[in-house]
Image (tube, helix red, strand yellow):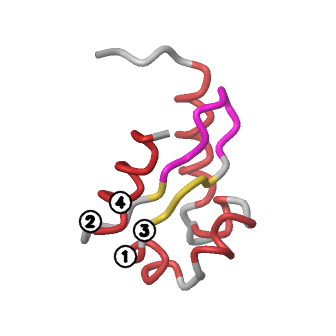
Amino acid sequence: SRLAILSKSALSDFRLAIARMSDKPCHYAIELVNEAYTNMVGYTPDEMLSIKWQATVHPEDLEAVTVGITKSCHEPIVS
């Protein structure tokens, strides 16, 4: 879609590390990453789309990040 093309273009030009995850409930798969993110984690864009997000988290942080993601999956977003 046009929005997907625009968001991909904007994302690729952004200097901060960004990864977009799947919007399927509790299915946190990486769908899109920008160059800054791949440079930070050391994977190519193609590799990023084929690995689990857990591979990009430092082992010492994995438990806390997993708890946070799981919690956000099961709690409504408050705006």
Q: Are marks 2 and 1 in contact (CB under 8 Å)?
A: yes
Count neighbours of disc 2 (C-alpha within 10 A) and say few if under 14, some if 14 to 19, many if 20 or more: few
In this view, 11 is above or below 56: above
In this view, 9 is above or below 46: above
Q: Quadrant of the C terminus?
A: top left
| Residue 30 on the magenta span | no
Tag 4 residue? 9
Count neighbours of disc 1 (C-alpha within 10 A) and say few if under 14, some if 14 to 19, many if 20 or more: some
- Which is nearer the N-term, disc 4 or disc 2? 4
Q: Are marks 4 and 2 in contact (CB under 8 Å)?
A: no
Measured Cα–Cα span from mark 4 to mark 2: 9 Å
The numbered dot on residue 14 is 2
Q: Amino acid at mark 3?
A: Asn
Q: Are marks 1 and 3 in contact (CB under 8 Å)?
A: yes
Q: Are marks 2 and 3 in contact (CB under 8 Å)?
A: yes
- Which is nearer the N-term, disc 4 or disc 3? 4
Q: Amino acid at mark 2?
A: Phe
* Left or right: 16 in relation to 59: left
Residue depicted at x 61% and y 20%: 74
Query: What secondary structure is marked by label 1?
Result: helix
Tag 3 residue? 34
Query: What secondary structure is marked by label 3?
Result: loop
The picture places residue 5, in percent across and down from the top left corner, at 43, 51
